[in-house]
Amino acid sequence: EFSESLAVAVEQEGVRRWFGEKGDDEALQKYERSLTKTNAFVDRVLADRDALEKLYASDLSETEKRTRKRDRLHQLQEHVRSLLRAAGREEEDTFWLRDELNNAHLNIVAAYHEGVPKFERLLAECGGDLSVFYEKLEDFEL
């Protein structure tokens, strides 16, 4: 999670800086809108993952847990389908739609995105200085 979230955070900062250096405000705004959509999706996936963790820890029967998990993952898959339709990409071949969703789908999103806000805060604390940021990573824990 550390490496993947760090890579995403650095990528996003790098893209922002690149568009800024080029003076391409339109591309930067388009990129920020794309990140807003991505972050909304990530928030939804992480919320569903948290809800499933609570479900697994509940006193419900195993049968009821499986049923509720299946229903929640089906709702998430329909949400993904609606996002793709809204973006004009409903025909896109994505592993989110090929098979039934499972914990692995949720864990992939978590591994790549859960730590990003913490890295963004650290970079802000470093005044945006990447050299200082990288030095502080040596003692940084998610």
Image (cartoon, grey):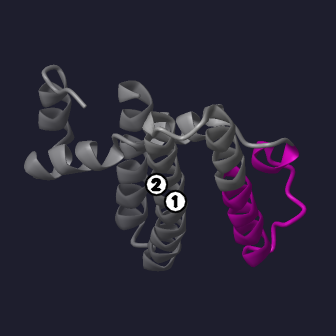
Q: Residue at x 50, y 36 (%)?
A: 56
Q: Please, is residue 73 above or below residue 58 in the view?
A: below
What crowding class fits label 2: few (fewer than 14 Cα within 10 Å), some (14-19), or many (20 or more)? few
Task: Tally the numbered discs.
Answer: 2
What amino acid type is highlighted by mark number 1? Arg
Question: Residue 140's spot in the image, x, y percent?
Answer: 17, 27
Q: Please, is residue 42 above or below residue 84 in the view?
A: above
What amino acid type is highlighted by mark number 2? Ala
> Can residue 81 be found in the magenta stretch?
yes
Question: Residue 107's spot in the image, x, y percent?
Answer: 54, 34
Q: Secondary structure at mark 1?
A: helix
Horizontal relation, residue 69 to residue 26: left or right: right
Q: Which of the pair 59/3 is nearer the observer?
A: 59
Q: Main secondary structure of the magenta part?
A: helix
Decide: marks 2, 1 in contact (CB < 8 A)? yes
Q: Residue at x 44, y 35 (%)?
A: 57
Horizontal relation, residue 57 to residue 95: left or right: left
- Distance between the Cα atoms at labels 2 and 1? 5 Å
Q: Which residue position is annotated with label 2?
A: 47
Q: Which of the pair 40/87 is nearer the observer?
A: 40
Horizontal relation, residue 21 to residue 134: left or right: right
Question: Residue 112's spot in the image, x, y percent?
Answer: 48, 38
Q: Secondary structure at mark 2?
A: helix
Rendered image quadrant of residue 21: bottom left
Q: Residue at x 24, y 44 (%)?
A: 118
Q: Please, is residue 100 above or below residue 45 in the view?
A: above
Q: Which of the pair 54/92 is nearer the observer?
A: 54
Q: Which mark is residue 95?
A: none
Q: Which residue position is annotated with label 1?
A: 44
Q: Please, is residue 137 above or below residue 42 in the view?
A: above
Boundaries of the magenta span? 73-98
Rendered image quadrant of residue 74: bottom right
